[in-house]
Amino acid sequence: MAQVIDGRQVAASITGTVKAAAAALEAETGVKTGLAVVIVGDDPASHAYVGAKGRMAKECGFNSVQHTLPATTTQADLAALVAALNADPSIHGILVQLPLPKPLASDPIIQSILPDKDVDGLHVVNAGKLATGDLATGLVSCTPAGAMVFVRRTHGDDLSGLSAVVIGRSNLFGKPMAQLLLNANATVTIAHSRTADLPEVCRRADILVAAVGRPEMVRAGWIKPGATVIDVGINRVPAPEKGEGKTRLVGDVAFAEAADVAGVLTPVPGGVGPMTIAMLMANTVIAAHRAAGRVPPAF
Ligand SMILES: Nc1nc(=O)c2c([nH]1)NC[C@@H]1CN(c3ccc(C(=O)N[C@@H](CCC(=O)O)C(=O)O)cc3)C=[N+]21
């Protein structure tokens, strides 16, 4: 039976470190860590996530600012808000909640955020720093950074000799996850929808990371016995057993059967999700330390 990682508990240990670091920074320099979250439109799921981020930022002792813009906001208005936040010295981190409502284009907005304030780690400068191994001055995308905390707590900092397979190749998750694993000396394969014999590729993995967005796609037979399996999927599926029209969250891994084979397994919910928010707080306090010319804590 696999050891199931409690993501909420690991996230709480991260935010504990963030809170202490923010308090020390404020006590010693007077700088209060500032996070600005921008949300456009009225998608209820996006508002729920943004609310959770704001509450966590306050818990960490940050100056937490939310900008809620109507769905009718123009590209120029949104760009002007980002420019104002870039210029505001009280703001150390800027997050523009994605996806943006149509017809707004997210890429020009993301690329207009100052890389030093890009706490989502999506700016090409931060992607490039990760790709070249410059973790000391860049910011890493929150979900892969959170998944990597689980990997490090299971296997240590050096993954030499271990084989890692990441299913999914997005800029948001798959590519940065693969870079982090490679930086830690793992032998990394990026698999995706065009990969031949995906189950066979996955069975080679000592560390299997699933980020495909297909409910319970990874079966027990895809998992090497004893492997570490990190489930990044968040899929809402019908749950008629809970009542008419009800839903539940499942990952990309068939959890119950995977638990019989894996050595370590992350659940959904309560796995990578809470870590995404915790690493956003970590990135923000890192950005605030750097802005104040101080060495940030390591996470
Ligand atoms: N600029 C931007 N940055 C993001 O990081 C970003 C974004 N846009 N847009 C949406 C996605 C999604 N995302 C999640 C964060 C936390 C949970 C989370 O805490 N999930 C809980 C369950 C929550 C529930 O019950 O619905 C869990 O897995 O335990 C999930 C998903 C961040 N995103």
Image (cartoon, grey):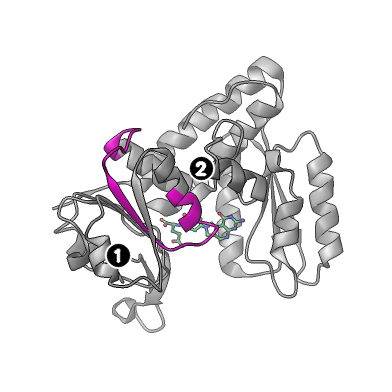
Residue 248 image offset from top left, x and y in percent = 37, 70
User: Residue 209 falls in which quadrant of the image?
Assistant: bottom left
Residue 159 image offset from top left, x and y in percent = 31, 38
Image point (64%, 34%), residue name = 287
Q: Nearer the viewer, residue 46 or 263?
A: 263
Residue 46 vertical position relative to residue 286 in the rendered view, above or below? below
Tell me whether the residue at label 2 lies in contact with that at label 1, contact meaning CB atoms closer than 8 angstroms: no
Residue 272 image offset from top left, x and y in percent = 40, 52
Image point (35%, 66%), residue name = 252
Question: Which dot marks residue 29?
Answer: none
Disc 2 CB within 8 Å of nearest ligand 1 atom: no
Q: Is residue 10 visible?
A: yes
Which residue of the protein is positioned furthest toward the bottom in this rendering? 244
Secondary structure of the residue carrying numbered label 1: loop
Query: Start and end of the magenta stretch?
Result: 154-178
Q: Judge from the rendering whether residue 9 lies leftward or rightward of residue 227; answer left or right.
A: right
Image point (60%, 55%), residue name = 50
Question: Which dot marks residue 253?
Answer: 1
Question: Which dot marks residue 279?
Answer: 2
